[in-house]
């Protein structure tokens, strides 16, 4: 019987295929505009960030053939963090078949015969990752503001595929997955595509085709649909997470005096949003590292541990007023936030929205635009030498009103 190292050497020599890797990366990121993360796992974890052209033109130099991973989505900055998401380009489920009672072949059979087209969409990729499968749907790129819907779709797919070993810890938008054509050292096999198709989905299409509860608008009698509530919660928790990051940015990460409460809230809302307590802690530690005066790592872990208990028991429902008070958020800061706002800022936004609703792209009300259009018609007819009586008749306005307009336009040197 061959040892794992012997099998690995055979795969490295005979099966690793950089052309397959390049094709996979091209299909994932040919139109990407942000940074793409490439990662490697051996004794340590390392990651690098590339723009699309650099990655695709230098794939052979960049991709290590063993345990190589790529982000499915892209980032504004060369940092793999949720607040840096630029484009959402895929939804995906990592199916760990070895954690279920099914083999990869059995899971593939159930997907094709029982689930595709009825419970879940046919994926763009079904990939043999070594010890499991990747179910990947490529979507028309959408910005980070679509994350609540993205998460709702992601969780729906996870719930359908959970009996087959879907990994609950691989649902975040910053996730990296193995690259086709590279080696999985644990299984001693190459990552390969089992099925593929070129159809490009949209998030809305998946929502409307498979998650109709989310798109309900009319209120119905009885208990509300679970997915409606879930979608609303995702939107709120995402807004909370992004607002806390924005507060830190506005204060230039000089948050001494608020560090503990910021990290607690960030860990708590991150756990609520991702439903992944380990990921929430990782993010809290990363945020702490950006502070001008970071807390010791052990202190962060211990002082925010209650955030996990709060998430698991859904202990807290923070109001805007409470968050504004405990974070000392000023009114000028609230103008940059999406959800943590007070009554004054709410009224200001409503007034601004109403103002914009009654004015066109030129900043004019309907009445002002009608007057402007009338002036242009009068100027045109006067330049053509038409007499005032004829203009009055053609434009269906009293002669005295017309003469008043003409007098005013002459005074303003418009005619």
Image: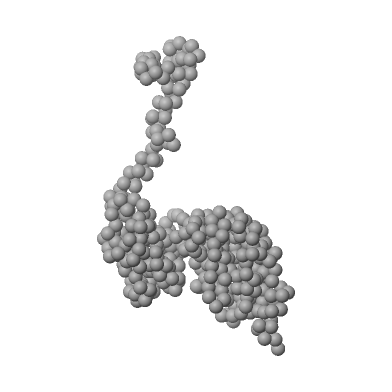
In x, y percent, where is residue 273?
43, 66
Residue drawn 40% across and 35% down? 363
Which quarter of the figure has residue 397? top left
Q: Is residue 211 left or right of residue 10?
A: left
Front in this rendered view, residue 91 or 24 = 24
Residue drawn 65% across and 74% down? 183
Q: Is residue 124 visible?
A: no
In x, y percent, where is residue 299?
34, 75
Residue drawn 73% across and 74% down? 14
Q: Is residue 324 above or below residue 385?
A: below
Quarter placement of the N terminus: bottom right
In x, y percent, where is residue 238?
42, 61
Q: Is residue 39 above or below residue 28?
A: below
Q: Is residue 407 left or right of residue 115?
A: left
Give the colour scheme shown. Answer: one colour
Which quarter of the figure has residue 136? bottom right
In x, y percent, where is residue 377?
46, 21
Q: Is residue 246 visible?
A: yes
Quarter placement of the C terminus: top left
Which quarter of the figure has residue 338? bottom left
Front in this rendered view, residue 365 or 184 = 184
Front in this rendered view, residue 244 or 369 = 244
Residue drawn 29% across and 57% down? 329
Q: Farthest residue toward the bottom?
A: 1
């Amino acid at each position: 019987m061959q040892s794992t190292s012997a099998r690995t050497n055979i795969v490295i020599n005979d099966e690793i295929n950089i052309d397959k890797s390049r094709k996979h990366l091209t299909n994932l990121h040919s139109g990407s505009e942000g940074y793409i993360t490439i990662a490697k796992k051996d004794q340590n974890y390392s990651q690098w960030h590339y723009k699309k052209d650099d990655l695709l033109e230098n794939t052979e130099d960049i991709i290590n053939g063993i345990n190589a991973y790529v982000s499915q989505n892209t980032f504004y900055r060369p940092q793999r963090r949720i607040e840096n998401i630029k484009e959402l380009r895929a939804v995906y489920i990592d199916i760990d078949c070895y954690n279920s009672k099914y083999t990869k072949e059995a899971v593939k059979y159930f997907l094709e015969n029982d689930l595709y087209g009825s419970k879940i969409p046919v994926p763009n990729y079904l990939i043999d990752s070594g010890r499991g499968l990747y179910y990947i749907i490529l979507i028309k790129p959408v910005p980070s503001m679509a994350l609540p819907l993205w998460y709702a779709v992601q969780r729906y797919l996870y719930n359908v595929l959970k009996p087959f070993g879907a990994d609950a810890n691989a649902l975040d938008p910053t996730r990296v997955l193995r690259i086709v054509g590279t080696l999985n050292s644990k299984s001693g096999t190459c990552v390969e595509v089992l099925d593929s198709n070129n159809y490009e989905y949209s998030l809305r299409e998946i929502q409307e085709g498979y998650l109709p509860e989310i798109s309900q608008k009319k209120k119905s009698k009885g208990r509300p649909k679970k997915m409606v509530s879930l979608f609303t919660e995702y939107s709120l928790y995402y807004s909370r997470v992004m607002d806390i990051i924005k507060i830190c940015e506005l204060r230039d990460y000089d948050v001494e005096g608020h560090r503990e409460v910021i990290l607690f809230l960030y860990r708590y809302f991150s756990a609520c949003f991702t439903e992944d307590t380990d990921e929430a802690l990782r993010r809290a530690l990363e945020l702490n590292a950006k502070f001008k005066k970071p807390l010791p790592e052990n202190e962060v872990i211990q002082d925010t541990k209650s955030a996990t208990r709060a998430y698991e028991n859904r202990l807290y429902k923070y109001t805007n007023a409470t968050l504004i008070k405990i974070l000392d958020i000023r009114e000028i800061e609230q103008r940059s936030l999406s959800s943590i706002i007070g009554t004054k800022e709410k009224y200001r936004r409503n007034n601004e929205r109403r103002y914009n609703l009654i004015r066109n792209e030129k900043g004019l009300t309907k009445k002002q635009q009608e007057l402007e259009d009338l002036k242009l018609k009068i100027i045109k007819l006067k330049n053509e030498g038409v007499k005032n009586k004829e203009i009055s008749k053609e434009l269906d306005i009293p002669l005295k009103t017309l003469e008043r307009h003409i007098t005013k336009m002459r005074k303003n040197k418009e005619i």
